């Protein structure tokens, strides 16, 4: 009787060890997939950061040129549709 009971316990322990090993393997695979996804996300964010740094440098350059009257006049004319007094502006309304 003891040998049957011992075999059942042994079988149960083996099953538990196998189930735990399967759980560990599945967890490791899931974590590796998540790490890969996060690395891709990090690469995308790093690229966005580099683009933003370039844009910030351009804004800083424009701020540094902000004291230049010609630059200010060009910005006012192009972006704000402003002009100098007694200035005639001709616009092409043909749409081409």
Image (cartoon, helix red, strand yellow):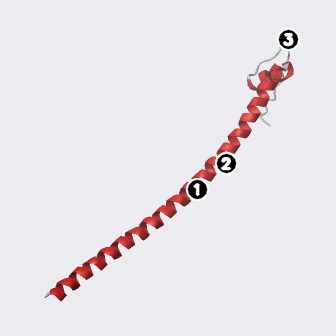
Labels 2 and 3: the sequence-earlier one: 2
User: For the residue labelled by badge 1, is the local secondary structure a helix, a strand or a loop?
Assistant: helix
Mark 1 or 3: the one toward you = 1
Q: Are marks 2 and 1 in contact (CB under 8 Å)?
A: no
Q: Residue at x 46, y 66 (%)?
A: 28
On the image, numbered disc 3 is attached to which residue?
86
Q: Are marks 2 and 3 in contact (CB under 8 Å)?
A: no
Q: Residue at x 85, y 11 (%)?
A: 86
Q: Name which quarter of the figure residue 74 lies in.
A: top right
On the image, numbered disc 1 is attached to which residue?
39
* CA distance separating discs 2 and 3: 48 Å
Q: Residue at x 83, y 11 (%)?
A: 85
Labels 1 and 3: the sequence-earlier one: 1
Characterize the local packing of mark 2: few (<14), some (14-19) or many (20 or more) Cα atoms within 10 angstroms. few
Measured as percent of width and height from the top left, residue 58 is found at 76, 34
On the image, numbered disc 2 is attached to which residue?
47
* CA distance separating discs 1 and 3: 59 Å
Identify the residue at the far top of this view: 85
Q: Residue at x 83, y 14 (%)?
A: 84
Position of residue 82 relative to residue 44, above or below, is above
Position of residue 31 relative to residue 80, above or below, is below
Labels 2 and 1: the sequence-earlier one: 1
Left or right: 4 in relation to 96 = left
User: For the residue labelled by badge 2, is the local secondary structure a helix, a strand or a loop?
Assistant: helix
User: For the residue labelled by badge 3, is the local secondary structure a helix, a strand or a loop?
Assistant: loop
């Amino acid at each position: 009787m003891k040998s049957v009971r011992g075999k059942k316990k042994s079988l149960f322990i083996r099953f538990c060890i196998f189930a735990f090993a399967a759980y560990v393997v599945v967890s490791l695979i899931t974590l590796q997939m998540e790490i890969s996804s996060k690395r891709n996300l990090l690469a995308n964010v790093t690229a966005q950061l580099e683009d933003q740094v370039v844009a910030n440098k351009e804004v800083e350059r424009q701020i540094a040129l902000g004291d230049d009257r010609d630059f200010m006049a060009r910005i006012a004319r192009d972006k704000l549709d402003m002009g100098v007094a007694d200035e005639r502006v001709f616009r092409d309304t043909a749409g081409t």
